[in-house]
Image (spheres, grey):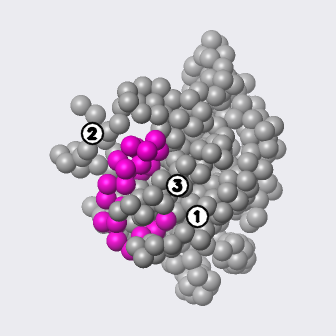
């Protein structure tokens, strides 16, 4: 029996069974659905993209996997070189893993050991209120969402602050000599409620991290590859460590990467074996994942996805920015994300089935109805998603 995610198995509604998928559409036995959330935000190229499928097939004809312990291969070498060229600044050192959550764990492990390797004891992590960084244990510890992690005790090693500059400055003043890193979802906090904040907060964070030699980590698992309207928020403010996943492989195979700058890498580079990063996911640098990631980045650049994302945002604002209803607290729009926050979660009960019957797959959570669409979506398909959202409030 399948144990489904984020569900009470005893009371859950039967999931929709997908028989096929292509472009932005999912197909069930009786319905054709526009996927408004890109299968948890990863399917930026849509489903059954012929080039991505072919990249996996070609690599599978050679070999599907070899470990990176004592071995290497061309796909991982090419992807590392491409990311070094593709990413801003001196984010040059790629440590691969098999999921975004694990990649976050790696980043936090790097930050702690970065200080340990230099003989400094800095046990604290600074993080954001309403943060979500994954469901593995250290990722949960730096997260701040009781709806996901209520069963686990809060640890003493993390300080959470709101996205307000005075709170940021106060935290650094109080804890700076004990902080090893500050980890954020930059500009857009995803599972914590699609919360959006200003770039000025991150610019000030960069200044304070530089002042006190605290590593700045950007968890761009969700925000990377254009979701905020920027290629990466790291293009605007440069972190010391960047975490990527989801869209890295276009959603075709699970994979992630933790990318460190020279300062971080150099703290591990030594004749002393004890200073090495002792971590090694079995499927890190998986050749199939590397091959599809390389092709996905090629398509992202060749097809000028940033122009597509700007257009998606323009259409989204035209359709949703002025939409109001007494049950709506706020409509938030950034890049390829639209969030409708309601005052009471009961106002969204039944919306998923309502959308299904109208040809849209949606998965609202808590007080949030949202879209994070594939970038290959047409205007007609995008507007249909927003029409269904608005119909919900007009008809209920």
Residue at the spot 59% in from the left edge and 44% down from the top edge: 381
- The mark found on residue 14 in the picture is 2
Camera-side mark, 3 or 2:
3
Q: Residues within 10 Å of mark 3 (few under 14, many from 20)?
A: some
Closer mark to the observer between disc 1 and disc 3: 3
Point out the tag, 3 or 2, that comes first from the N-terminus: 2
Location of mark 3 (residue): 387
| Secondary structure of residue under mark 3 | helix
Q: Nearer the viewer, mark 2 or mark 1?
A: 1
Mark 1 or mark 3, which has the lower sequence index? 1
Q: Position of residue 12 (x, y in %)?
A: 24, 46
The magenta stretch spans which residues?
A: 340-363
The answer to whether any part of residue 6 appears in the image is yes
Residue at coordinates 42% horizontally, 64% vertically from top-left?
A: 393
Residue 281, compared with residue 11, is above or below; it is above
Quadrant where the C terminus is found in the figure = bottom left
Label 1 sits on residue: 320
Residue 389 numbered mark, or none: none
């Amino acid at each position: 029996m399948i144990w489904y995610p984020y569900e009470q198995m005893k009371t859950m509604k039967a999931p929709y069974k997908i028989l096929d998928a292509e472009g932005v559409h999912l197909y069930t036995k009786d319905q054709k659905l526009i996927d408004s959330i890109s299968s948890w935000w990863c399917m930026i190229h849509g489903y059954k993209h012929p080039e991505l499928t072919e990249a996996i097939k070609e690599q599978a004809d050679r070999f599907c996997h070899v470990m990176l312990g004592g071995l290497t291969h061309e796909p991982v070498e090419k992807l590392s070189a491409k990311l070094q060229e593709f990413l801003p600044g001196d984010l040059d050192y790629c440590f691969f893993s098999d999921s975004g959550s694990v990649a976050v764990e790696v980043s936090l492990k790097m930050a702690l050991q970065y200080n340990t390797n230099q003989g400094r004891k800095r046990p604290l992590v600074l993080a954001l209120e309403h943060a979500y960084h994954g469901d593995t244990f250290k990722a949960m510890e730096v997260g701040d969402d009781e709806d996901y992690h209520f069963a686990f005790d809060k640890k003493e090693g993390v300080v959470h602050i709101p996205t307000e500059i005075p709170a940021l400055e106060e935290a650094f003043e109080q804890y700076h000599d004990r902080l090893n890193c500050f980890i954020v979802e930059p500009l857009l906090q995803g599972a914590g409620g699609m919360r959006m904040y200003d770039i000025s907060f991150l610019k000030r964070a960069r200044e304070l991290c530089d002042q006190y030699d605290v590593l700045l980590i950007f968890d761009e698992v969700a925000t990377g590859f254009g979701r905020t309207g920027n290629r990466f928020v790291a293009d605007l403010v440069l972190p010391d460590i960047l975490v990527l996943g989801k869209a890295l492989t276009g959603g075709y195979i699970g994979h992630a990467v933790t990318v460190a700058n020279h300062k971080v890498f150099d703290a591990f580079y030594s004749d002393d074996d004890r200073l090495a990063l002792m971590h090694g996911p079995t499927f890190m640098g998986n050749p199939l994942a590397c091959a599809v990631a390389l092709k996905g980045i090629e398509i992202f650049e060749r097809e000028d996805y940033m122009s597509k994302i700007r257009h998606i945002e323009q259409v989204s604002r035209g359709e949703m920015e002025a939409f109001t209803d007494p049950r709506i607290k706020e409509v938030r729009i950034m890049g390829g994300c639209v969030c409708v926050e309601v005052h009471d979660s009961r106002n969204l009960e039944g919306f998923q089935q309502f959308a299904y019957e109208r040809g849209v797959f949606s998965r609202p959570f808590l007080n949030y109805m949202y879209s994070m669409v594939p970038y290959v979506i047409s205007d007609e398909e995008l507007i249909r998603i927003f029409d269904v959202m608005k119909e919900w409030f007009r008809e209920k």
